Image: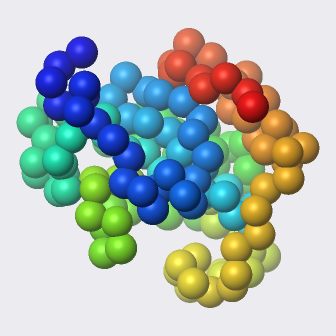
Amino acid sequence: MDELELEFELDPRLVTDTIAIGDYPLCRLLLMNDSQYPWFILVPRRAGVTELYHLPASEQQQLIHEASDLAETLADLFQARKMNVACLGNMVPQLHMHVIVRKENDPAWPGPVWGKVPSVAYTQEQLDRVRGKLEALLDGEMAFEPHN
């Protein structure tokens, strides 16, 4: 583990708004606590990184690999109409990548998910179902957080 990973902390807003799912080799995987969309966030475990170009080239490639792997898995798992994958950072400056499953019947379709409707937190049963599906499909590709 290098110094940047040792100093890594999630932005407080991500801590408040998400549920930790586990760790890929580079990124922490979070689930946005809004059950209306399968909305995941990848955060490279690197302190002080706010832009993609702040990562060395090998870690930029790793982030894209992890995002692509996750997007493909989620598209199949949730029968996506479209996958939205983006780094914005207007509200949370820490580098993070949104990976959002979109369907024509979701509350924000076809617009962006941000601020369209109030969020609806996951129930424990819904969360357990999502975690179980991910664990079955991504076993061996990431280290999962223990269930609460």
- In the rendering, at what x and y percent does residue 37 appear? 69, 63
Q: Can residue 57 be seen?
A: yes
Task: Indicate left or right for 6 with 21 as reference.
Answer: left
**Residue lying at 45% horizontally and 62% vertically, measured from the top left:** 13
Q: Quarter holding the N terminus?
A: top left
Looking at this rendering, what residue extends furthest in the right direction?
Answer: 125
**Residue lying at 28% horizontally and 54% vertically, measured from the top left:** 95
**Residue lying at 23% horizontally and 33% vertically, measured from the top left:** 7
Q: Quarter holding the C terminus?
A: top right
The front one of 65 and 40 is 40
Placement of 27 over or under 2, stated as above or below = below
- In the rendering, at what x and y percent does residue 66 appear? 40, 35
Q: In which quarter of the image is residue 94?
A: bottom left
Q: Can residue 40 be seen?
A: no
Task: Indicate left or right for 132 with 69 as reference.
Answer: right
Q: Quadrant of residue 65?
A: top left
The front one of 135 and 45 is 45
Placement of 37 over or under 118, stated as above or below = above
Placement of 48 over or under 50, stated as above or below = above
Placement of 82 over or under 108, stated as above or below = above
Task: Indicate left or right for 99 with 132 as reference.
Answer: left
- In the rendering, at what x and y percent does residue 46 appear? 23, 37
The front one of 8 and 90 is 8
**Residue lying at 69% horizontally and 64% vertically, measured from the top left:** 34
